[in-house]
Image (cartoon, rainbow, N blue to C red):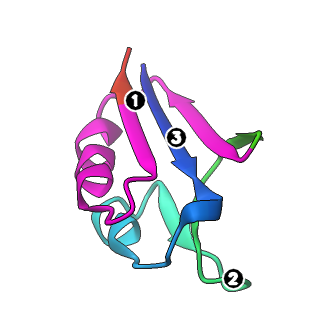
Amino acid sequence: MVVVTLQREKCIGCNYCVELAPNQFQMSKKDGKSVLLRSQEKKGFYTIKSPDNFIFDDCDKAAKACPVKIISVKNV
């Protein structure tokens, strides 16, 4: 199970996450911030839990590339 979390409010809109994990992230046309697709929001944190371990590598690359370090990826 892969758990990906995004603190969307702190996003600066650099687009690295979309470039590295386009199946999980896209940029909002409204405010230019990243959107974690199919996520659930709770207290400003957007989270997906996926049984698909194939998304781990791309999401991990996106988390490491994020200049404001607002993406976390865990393999549980």
Q: Nearer the viewer, mark 1 or mark 3?
A: 3
Q: Which residue is mark 3?
A: 5
Tell me which label, 1 or 2, sits earlier in the chain.
2
Q: State whether residue 16 is above or below residue 51.
A: below
Q: Which residue is mark 1?
A: 52
Q: CA distance from mark 1 to mark 2?
A: 29 Å
Q: Nearer the viewer, mark 1 or mark 2?
A: 2
Tell me which label, 1 or 3, sits earlier in the chain.
3
Q: Which residue is mark 2?
A: 31
Examine the image and state in which quarter residue 51 appears: top left
Q: State whether residue 10 is above or below residue 24.
A: below
Residue at horizontal 53 percent and vertical 67 percent from the top: 11
Q: Which is nearer the eye, 45 or 51?
A: 45
Q: How many other residues sit within 10 Å of disc 3, few (<14), some (14-19) or many (≥20)?
A: many
Q: CA distance from mark 1 to mark 3?
A: 15 Å
Q: Amino acid at mark 2?
A: Asp
Q: Residue furthest top?
A: 76
Examine the image and state in which quarter residue 62 appears: bottom left
Specify the segment rendered in magenta. 44-73
**Residue 1 appears left or right of 55:** right
Secondary element type, mark 2: loop
The C terminus lies in quadrant: top left
Residue at horizontal 40 percent and vertical 64 percent from the top: 22
Q: State whether residue 11 is above or below residue 39.
A: below
Secondary element type, mark 3: strand
Examine the image and state in which quarter residue 53 appears: top left
Q: Tags 3 and 2 in contact by the CB under 8 Å rule?
A: no
Q: Amino acid at mark 1?
A: Asp
Tell me which label, 3 or 2, sits earlier in the chain.
3
Q: Amino acid at mark 3?
A: Thr
Residue at horizontal 72 percent and vertical 47 percent from the top: 44
Q: How many other residues sit within 10 Å of disc 2, few (<14), some (14-19) or many (≥20)?
A: few
